[in-house]
C-alpha cells in the first residue's frame, strides 16, 4: 500500500565539516522527539554516497563502528515516526539513488498531498517504486526532469509538489535544502566556524539541534526557498511564487521542543503564553496547578503564574520506556499510562487540582490521567487544555487519527468533560491561541482546530480513506 502520510519526522543536514556524520548524528539525537521509529544518515566524500539506516532510536543505531562507515564532509539525516502498519525499513530515510542527475539522497519532513497522483503518472511513464513512502516520488520527478542541472531539476520537481515539505538533499559536492511555499513544517539554518576560520553550515528541523552541534542559528529557510551549500559558498533563491504562509501551529503547541526557536519564535514563550491566556479564559477554583509531563509543563507554568496558584509537578514521567513490555497476563488497569506516569500522592491528597495538558485527541489517555490523579487522592480535577478542541485530521505531516476518532469532532465540551471524568474542562479559544503564538499576520495553519485547510485538497476523500485503511 502507498503510504501518503509521511508523518512526524526530523531532518538535519551538514555541509563542510570533517566529521559530518557525527554532527548529523548529534543533530538527530536532539530531534529524537520528532520520530522514534527509524533513523538514517547519508554522507558523501565527493565520490560515493554512504548510507546507514535502521529501525529504532538514534543513539542505538549510530554506534562508533557504524559512524566509521560514513565518511565525508557532507551529510543528511532523518528520524521518522509512523503509525503501525508501515514500520518497514524500506520506508526509512534518507532515500539514496544514482540517477541521470548523479548520486542524490533525500530526507523529508511533511506530507505531499498530491503524491498519489504524481506516483500514478510516474508509474505510467515507467518509474519503478521501491517503498510506499511519498518521498520517493520526489527522486523520480528529479530523474524525469528535462532540466540538465541538479538545481534546475529540483526546482522542476518541487514545483509539482503540493502539501507540506521541508527537504534536505545530498549530492556529491553539495547540500540543497528547501521548504514548501506555505512553510508548513519548520527548517532552520545555522553555521559554525571550524579550523582555519572556514564556515560549516547546518540545517535542522529545530534549533535545539544547533545547540548540541555548537552551531549558531541564523534564520529559517523561507517558505518557497531553496538554499544550496556548495563549493562556491551558499546561495539562496526563491523557487516558487509567494503563497500565504501556513506554519503548523501544533509545532508551537506540542510537537517541537520548548528549547527550540521554531518559525523564528521561542516555543517556550508560546507555550507559557498559552497557559497564561488559558488561566484568564478558563479559571478554576483550585489549590494547585499540575502539568501532564512533558507536553503540559510550559503551559502549566504560564497558568500558575497568571492564576497565582502554585505549580506542583505531581505527575512523574518515566523517560526510560523501552519499545516492548511484558505485561502481566492478568491485565492491570490502565497499565499503559502507568508505565509512563505515576502520581505523587503526597502532593495530591485532598487537593483541588488544575491539570494542564496540551491537547485531547481521542480522550482515552486524558481519561486515564484524570482517573490516576483522582485515585491518588485529589478531591477535584479540573482539566485545562492549551489549545482549542481538535476537530479535523492533519494532512500536512502531524499524526492525527481520522475525524470519527477525534472526540472533539462530534462531542461538545460538556460531553468530553463527562467522558474524561473531570470536574470541569476548559479549552483555549482560537483567538487566544493566535495571540499566544504572536500570529498578527495570519501566518499559521489551524486546520486541526477549524477544518479549514489552507491548500486545495482535491483528493480529500482519497486522503481520508487512505488514512482509515492505515489504522
Ligand atoms: P488522548 O487523551 O488519548 O486524546 O491523548 C492526549 C495526549 O496525547 C496528550 O497528552 C497529548 O500530549 C498527546 N498527543 C497529542 N497529539 C499527539 C500526537 N500527534 N502524537 C502523539 N501524542 C500526541
Image (cartoon, rainbow, N blue to C red):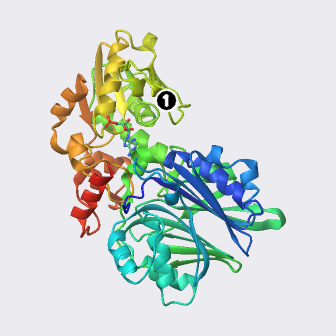
Q: Is mark 1 within 8 Å of ligand 1?
A: no
Q: Residue at x 35, y 20 (%)?
A: 333
Instruction: Using the image, determine if residue 227 lies above or below residue 396.
Output: below
Q: Position of residue 170 (x, y in %)?
A: 61, 71
Ligand 1 appears in which quadrant? top left
Closer to the camera in the image, 229 or 393: 393
Closer to the camera in the image, 187 or 77: 77
Q: Is residue 359 left or right of residue 33?
A: left
Closer to the camera in the image, 420 or 38: 38
| Residue 95 visible to an observer of this rendering | yes
Q: Position of residue 423 (x, y in %)?
A: 23, 22
Q: How many C-alpha atoms fall within 10 Å of the one at disc 1: few (<14), some, or many (≥20)?
A: few
Instruction: Using the image, determine if residue 277 lies above or below residue 69.
Output: above
Q: Which residue is mark 1?
A: 325
Closer to the camera in the image, 101 or 166: 101
Q: Is residue 283 left or right of residue 309?
A: left
Q: How many marks?
A: 1
Q: Residue at x 57, y 85 (%)?
A: 100
| Residue 314 visible to an observer of this rendering | no
Q: Position of residue 317 (x, y in %)?
A: 49, 27
Dot 1 lies on which element? loop
The quarter in which the N terminus is drawn is bottom left
Q: Is residue 77 left or right of residue 365?
A: right
Instruction: Using the image, determine if residue 10 lies above or below residue 168.
Output: above
Amino acid at each position: 500500500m502507498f503510504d501518503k502520510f509521511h508523518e512526524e519526522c526530523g531532518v538535519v543536514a551538514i555541509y563542510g565539516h570533517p566529521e559530518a556524520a557525527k554532527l548529523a548524528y548529534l543533530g538527530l539525537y536532539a530531534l529524537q522527539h520528532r520520530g522514534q521509529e527509524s533513523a538514517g544518515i547519508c554522507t558523501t566524500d565527493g565520490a560515493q554516497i554512504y548510507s546507514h539506516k535502521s529501525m529504532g532510536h538514534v543513539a542505538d543505531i549510530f554506534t562508533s563502528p557504524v559512524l566509521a562507515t560514513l565518511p565525508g564532509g557532507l551529510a543528511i539525516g532523518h528520524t521518522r515516526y509512523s503509525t503501525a502498519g508501515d514500520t518497514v525499513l524500506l520506508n526509512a530515510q534518507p532515500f539514496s539513488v544514482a540517477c541521470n542527475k548523479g548520486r542524490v539522497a533525500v530526507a523529508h519532513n511533511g506530507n505531499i498531498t498530491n503524491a498519489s497522483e504524481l506516483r500514478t503518472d510516474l508509474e505510467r511513464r515507467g518509474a519503478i517504486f521501491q517503498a510506499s513512502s511519498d518521498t520517493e516520488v520526489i527522486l523520480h520527478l528529479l530523474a524525469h526532469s528535462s532540466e540538465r542541472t541538479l538545481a534546475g531539476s529540483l526546482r522542476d520537481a518541487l514545483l509539482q509538489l503540493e502539501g507540506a515539505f521541508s527537504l534536505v538533499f545530498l549530492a556529491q559536492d553539495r547540500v540543497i535544502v528547501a521548504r514548501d511555499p506555505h512553510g508548513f513544517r519548520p527548517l532552520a539554518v545555522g553555521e559554525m566556524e571550524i579550523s582555519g576560520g572556514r564556515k560549516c553550515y547546518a540545517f535542522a528541523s529545530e534549533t535545539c539541534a544547533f545547540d548540541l552541534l555548537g552551531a549558531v542559528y541564523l534564520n529559517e529557510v523561507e517558505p518557497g526557498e531553496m538554499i544550496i551549500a556548495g563549493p562556491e559558498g551558499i546561495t539562496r533563491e526563491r523557487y516558487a511564487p509567494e503563497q500565504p504562509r501556513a506554519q503548523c501551529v501544533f509545532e508551537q503547541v506540542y510537537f517541537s521542543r520548548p528549547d527550540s526557536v521554531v518559525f523564528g519564535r521561542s516555543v517556550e514563550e508560546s507555550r507559557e503564553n498559552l497557559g497564561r491566556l488559558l488561566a484568564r479564559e478558563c479559571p478554576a477554583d483550585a489549590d494547585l496547578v499540575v502539568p501532564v509531563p512533558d507536553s503540559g509543563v510550559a503551559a502549566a507554568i504560564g497558568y500558575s503564574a497568571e492564576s497565582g496558584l502554585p505549580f506542583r509537578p505531581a505527575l512523574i514521567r518515566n523517560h526510560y520506556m523501552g519499545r516492548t513490555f511484558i505485561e502481566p497476563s492478568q491485565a492491570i488497569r490502565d497499565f499503559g499510562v502507568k508505565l509512563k506516569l505515576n502520581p505523587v500522592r503526597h502532593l495530591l491528597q485532598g487537593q483541588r487540582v488544575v491539570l494542564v495538558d496540551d491537547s485531547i485527541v481521542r480522550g482515552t489517555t486524558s481519561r486515564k490521567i484524570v482517573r490516576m490523579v483522582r485515585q491518588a487522592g485529589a478531591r477535584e480535577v479540573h482539566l485545562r487544555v492549551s489549545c482549542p478542541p481538535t476537530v479535523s485530521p492533519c494532512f500536512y505531516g502531524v499524526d492525527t487519527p481520522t475525524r470519527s476518532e477525534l472526540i472533539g469532532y462530534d462531542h461538545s465540551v460538556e460531553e468530553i468533560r463527562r467522558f474524561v471524568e473531570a470536574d470541569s474542562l476548559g479549552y483555549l479559544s482560537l483567538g487566544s491561541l493566535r495571540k499566544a503564538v504572536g500570529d498578527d499576520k495570519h501566518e499559521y495553519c489551524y486546520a486541526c482546530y477549524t477544518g479549514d485547510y489552507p491548500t486545495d485538497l482535491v483528493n480529500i476523500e482519497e486522503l481520508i480513506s487512505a488514512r482509515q485503511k492505515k489504522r
